[in-house]
Amino acid sequence: MKLLAIVGTNADFSYNRFLEQFMARRYQDQAEIEVYEIADLPPFKKEAQPDSKVEEFKNKIREADGVIFATPEYDHGIPSSLKSAMEWTGSHAQGNANVMKMKPAMVLGTSYGIQGASRAQEEMREILLSPDQSANVLPGNEVLIGHAADKFDKNTGDLLDQETIHAIDLAFSNFVKFVEQTQK
Ligand SMILES: Cc1cc2nc3c(=O)[nH]c(=O)nc-3n(C[C@H](O)[C@H](O)[C@H](O)COP(=O)(O)O)c2cc1C
């Protein structure tokens, strides 16, 4: 199974990147997880000329059996860089739109405070369910990881909190089953 893990930020330092890198390592026996950076994508513009980075991004999604999004929370929503990336996937402006259509998608996230990016994750799910995305979003299985700085090792990126690891294990195994079911 091939999964694309999209880092929901263009930040150089990101706990959400740590989270996806951790998942790629931990679940390597279950899936081939590629951690994908949105930092090099141009900001979305409706009338833009075809762009090789955008095409590469869409192709990665097209070729994946499922997509994982780990999003930080900015002002009770997702970062603008992630919103912009999603506008590229949903837009008809460059042809081959709707690469997310019926694509199995899993959302999780981590933030500095107690909320665990809850509002950003909710917004991300809403975006994925919008008509031009129409993704097949894994229901339930919310993983809200608060206090990121206490749960990850800042130097190695390892996730240290056992309760959080258990919650991610459960959600990920449900996502694998969800992807397999959609492939039948
Ligand atoms: C512009 C900005 C807005 C933020 N707004 C929120 C917020 O509304 N709620 C929240 O819990 N954290 C907020 N934070 C802090 C985030 O928890 C934190 O930057 C981010 O989620 C951690 O993810 P990262 O390490 O992957 O960047 C904000 C941070 C920035 C830079």
Image (cartoon, rainbow, N blue to C red):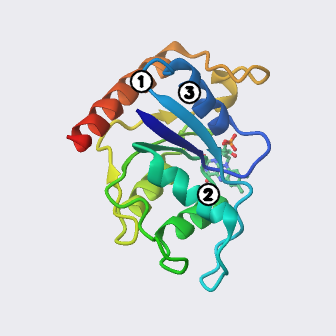
Instruction: Tell me the kind of residue under disc 2.
Output: Glu
When the figure is inspected, residue 23 is found, relative to residue 62, above or below; the finding is above
User: Earlier along the polypeptide chain: callout 3 or callout 1?
Assistant: 3
- Is residue 162 left or right of 159 when viewed as pictured? left
User: Earlier along the polypeptide chain: callout 2 or callout 3?
Assistant: 3
When the figure is inspected, residue 49 is found, relative to residue 38, above or below; the finding is below
Instruction: Tell me the kind of residue under disc 3.
Output: Ala
Q: Across the whole image, how many numbered discs are drawn on residues?
A: 3
What residue sits right under mark 2 in the picture? 56
The picture places residue 49, in percent across and down from the top left corner, at 67, 81
Measured in 3D between alpha carbons, the distance from the residue under mark 3 to the one under mark 1, in whole angstroms, is 16 Å
Residue shown at the point (45%, 36%) measured from the top left = 2
Measured in 3D between alpha carbons, the distance from the residue under mark 2 to the one under mark 1, in whole angstroms, is 32 Å
What residue sits right under mark 3 in the picture? 24
- Name the front one of labels 2 and 3: 2
Per the image, label 3 sits on a secondary structure element best described as helix
Any mark on residue 167, and which?
1
- The quadrant in which the C terminus is found is top left
Per the image, label 2 sits on a secondary structure element best described as helix
